[in-house]
Image: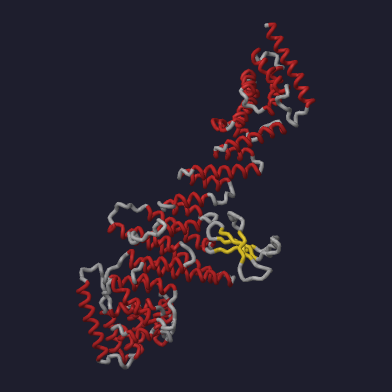
Amino acid sequence: MEEVDVEPTTTPIPGFDSNQKHLGFVWGPGDILVYETIYKASGGSAGGCPFVHEVRKDEDIYSPILRKLFNESHHIFVGLQRIREDLPSKNKKPQFVSISKNYRSVIRACMEELQQVAVSTQDAAMATQYGNQVSILLAVELIWNLCEVLFIDAAPAGSLVLHLLDWVRLHKADVDEKAREVLASESPAEHQAYWDVVISYVLQGRMDEARQVLVKQAALQPAARVMFKLLDNLLMKMPIFNPGETQTLTEFDVKWRHWREEVDHCLQDQSFASNRHLEDICKILVGDEDVLLEYKELLSTWYHFLVTRLLFSHPTVKPTELHYYAQSSMHMFLDTRSVPEPLDSILLAAFEFDIHQVIKDCSIALNNWWFVGHLTDLLDHCKLLQSHNLHFGSNLREFLLLEYASGLFTHHSLWQLAVDYFDHCPEFGRVYLELQIERVPLDTERKALKVIRICEQRQMTEQVRSICKIMAKKALRNNRLGSALSWSIRAKDAAFATLISERFLQDYCAKGTFSDLDLIDNLGPAMLLSDRLTFLGKYREFHRLYGEKRFSDAAKLLLSLMTAKIAPHSFWMTLLTDALPLLEQKEVIFSADQTHELMFCLEELTSGKSVPTPDKPMQVLATVHTALRASLARVKQLFTLH
């Protein structure tokens, strides 16, 4: 269970009896709600229910497949932020369209992988979950693709219907599967789905495919060959606007109207009256809405109906006219008693060019902020959202990216992606990052170093200090003194460095050796952080000098530790004990002045100003005291003789 920041508060629920029920609730990091249930209100003593429930709002970040979506889209997002602002907008449009397609390809790749896993899994519950995620991604890509056509690519009249046809074909690919089944049969023209395939191809404007399948039927009916040939000719001659040619939109419109009159003439002459299917195809070519609605099952959605209707009735429709046809198509196609689904409302808002309504409805309908965050960011780069600011000061793009990135911070690895999103939110990104980075669980030193590196790159000194303190305390609890000291030095925490230095000295007194010698030997300027750390470093240096038989330097350093008051009084007895071997050397190590200073330190220690530590009982003090006096007397005698 995720850790929450504070204890849950108890809230009474009105309307219950004496055995009143209560709920305790609190928001943890991200979208996680932790709460307790049922408290007995009997004299203030809480007979708490042992059950604690955890509710997650966003499960997608815990799906291994969808994590690929988050990782891949992160790279696309970062690349988008690097597009130079000073480039003219017309030069950026191809880049924006390319980026939009990259986003969609990532969505589709995840969707295909989820479909494969849903089919292969033996767990029915998991299959259902994967199936739901596939449905969501299908809707997401459908909306994104439409936004790409209408807003990002901003297809003009003529090209608009072609782009919408591609949009419908991409999201209604079942006709190809059905066509393969029909054509693979022994007698395709007699297959029960034969005419469904032909008419589906026509409804999608795929005239070449429709003609190829029609040939199968024409071969079976030699007597009707003329009729099939006539329809084949009409399908072949249907004008399709090509933006790459020199033909103007007006010229295309004239050519299309001539073709339409020819098709209409065939209907008037009842050229296809003897074959209902061919006559229906001819009526579809003239945009007969009643016939189109008869094939609702093949169209399956109102927006497919809309695009087919535009193809055969208004192929040069302008973007500004779309909203009228979209509204009427939805009303014509849907049952008057049925309520439009959220997806219908979102697509209708897109056809009405209401970008903000699209984003708002998607925010409500979808289960996380990934889609609205990335789409809004792209639309903002296209300069389509500049006028929309929120009442609390942030713009829409930044608000959605902040919400998305905050959700990523609840995941054990995705939080690293969130950092880049915060970096590209100029208004509040820094503040959010400072708050969220402190919530990252510091499970290992490696992870802590990763977090610190992120903070140091952004000059977040307070966060660095806080993380180092946390790691120092954790290391100390585990009795890893070297690591604890290293973290406290990095945090520049003098009080904690003093505490750990004390522990080092206690360990030395107990064991007679130092642990983590490499760290202590290489403290350098860091030993100046606290007096106790300075003493630890200098005392270790005394042992090193002694080990190298540099007795004079060792004696000088030892004495300075006491006379400069760097050494704690509780440690003076240890220092005086360390002085004994130097005093007993054959050669004189301490000078006369140094000897007097040692005697003064000894007198101060035994005068009552300093109390012996519990591990140095009075008999030990007396022994050391006698030995020191004898040694000091010998040194003094040597100086007198000289």
- Residue 638 lies left or right of residue 175; in this view the side is right
Residue at 36 percent of width and 61 percent of height: 388
- Height in image: 431 above or below 183? above
Q: Nearer the viewer, residue 418 or 528?
A: 528
Q: Quadrant of residue 523?
A: top right
Kindly tell me whether residue 209 is visible in this rendering. Answer: no
- Height in image: 399 above or below 520? below
Q: Quadrant of residue 602?
A: top right
Residue 505 in the image, given as x and y percentages of width and height? 67, 32
Q: Nearer the viewer, residue 48 or 141?
A: 48
**Quarter the N terminus occupies:** bottom right
Query: Coloring scheme of the render?
Result: secondary structure
- Height in image: 609 above or below 497? above
Residue 77 in the image, given as x and y percentages of width and height? 41, 56
Residue 404 in the image, given as x and y percentages of width and height? 47, 59
Residue at 59 percent of width and 50 percent of height: 443
**Quarter the C terminus occupies:** top right
* Residue furthest out toward the right: 619
Mark count: 0
Residue 457 in the image, given as x and y percentages of width and height? 46, 44
Kindly tell me whether residue 383 is visible in this rendering. Answer: yes
- Residue 520 lies left or right of residue 284; in this view the side is right
- Residue 587 lies left or right of residue 273; in this view the side is right
Residue at 42 percent of width and 82 percent of height: 182
Q: Nearer the viewer, residue 252 or 389?
A: 389
